[in-house]
Image (cartoon, coloured by chain):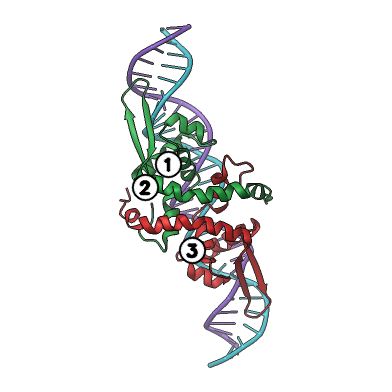
Chain colours: A red, B green, C cyan, D purple
Amino acid sequence: MKKRSYSCGLDAAVDVVGGKWKALILWALHDGPRRFGELRRGVPGISEKSLIIQLREMEHCGLVHREVYHQVPPKVEYSLTDLGTSLNQALIPLGEWGEKHMKTIEAIPAA
Amino acid sequence: MKKRSYSCGLDAAVDVVGGKWKALILWALHDGPRRFGELRRGVPGISEKSLIIQLREMEHCGLVHREVYHQVPPKVEYSLTDLGTSLNQALIPLGEWGEKHMKTIEAIPAA
DNA sequence: TCCGATACTGAAGAAAAGGTAGGTACCTGA
DNA sequence: TCAGGTACCTACCTTTTCTTCAGTATCGGA
């Protein structure tokens, strides 16, 4: 969320879900609430710090809901809001595209 | 294209179309070939340098095609390949989501 | 003769994103 | 007493991304 005005809908969506991790985190939440530790394990490669920052930003945007259980040891659950769920729906075709063309993409030389 | 393996399709798609500009550029090409200058004007806010870099990367990935006309002044046209077109299709729901929720997104406070 | 238009390239630096490593607080169980 | 598990926070540093600004080559037109 850096911009104040967008040139089109895609511009706005990219601003909200942009970056390396947000789409993956959203995806990881698609079948129900997840605890912090579950997300960390469910999004391979992400660092704790990045995960927290992304979650906070998405909470701020109203995409995810954060529920704290005052227990010991602490328990925090993250879940999708209605807005987050609708965004997740919009990401499905992109996920399918990636699935379909993954082999092609992986075969692209790095240089 | 930095990774060699992906945890899921969405991961792969984000890797290909990630960043601030690629989705917008792809979008700008959706109704036919565009010259370099047209793209620069059609994607507001982008610098020449970024535009070229993004175009080169997408050409490398097989998403866009670059056609040079040896004229003076020079003319270069960029167009979508089949792969680029299919990716663009997958971006449509995201664009629609952004369109629908743009007001909400714009109303989010910066802090 | 010099300006403008086209499509770039390169250097330099700022800004954003991400990673690492440490620490906090709490209670449980050994 | 002390390690272990939870969910963080903070400081520091590196990497990546983006912007700015300058410059290249060609030709037509003023």
In the picture, measured across the screen, residue A93 lies left or right of residue A33, that is: left
Check disc 1 and report the residue beneath it: B54
Residue that appears at 54% across and 46% down:
A10
Of B21 and A52, the residue lying toward us:
B21
Q: Mark 3: which amino acid?
A: Ile
Q: Which mark is residue B3?
A: none
Check disc 2 and report the residue beneath it: B83
Comes first in the chain, label 1 or label 2: 1
Q: Mark 2: which amino acid?
A: Leu
Of D25 and A17, the residue lying toward us:
A17
In the picture, measured across the screen, residue B19 lies left or right of residue A85, that is: left
3D distance between C-alphas at marks 1 and 3: 25 Å
Q: Mark 2 falls within which chain?
A: B
Give yes or no for contact between labels 1 and 2 (Cβ–Cβ under 8 Å).
Answer: no
User: Where is residue B46 shown, x and y percent of the image?
Assistant: 51, 37
Q: Is residue B77 above or below residue B95?
A: above
3D distance between C-alphas at marks 1 and 2: 16 Å
User: Where is residue C10 shown, x and y percent of the image?
Assistant: 38, 34
Residue that appears at 49% across and 42% down:
B24
Point out the frontmost of discs 1 and 2.
2
Q: Mark 1: which amino acid?
A: Gln
Check disc 3 and report the residue beneath it: A46
Q: Is residue A53 visible?
A: no
Residue that appears at 39% across and 61% down:
B6
Q: Confirm whether circles 1 and 2 share one chain.
A: yes
> Picture quarter containing residue A75?
bottom right
In the picture, measured across the screen, residue D14 lies left or right of residue A32, that is: left
Q: Mark 3 falls within which chain?
A: A
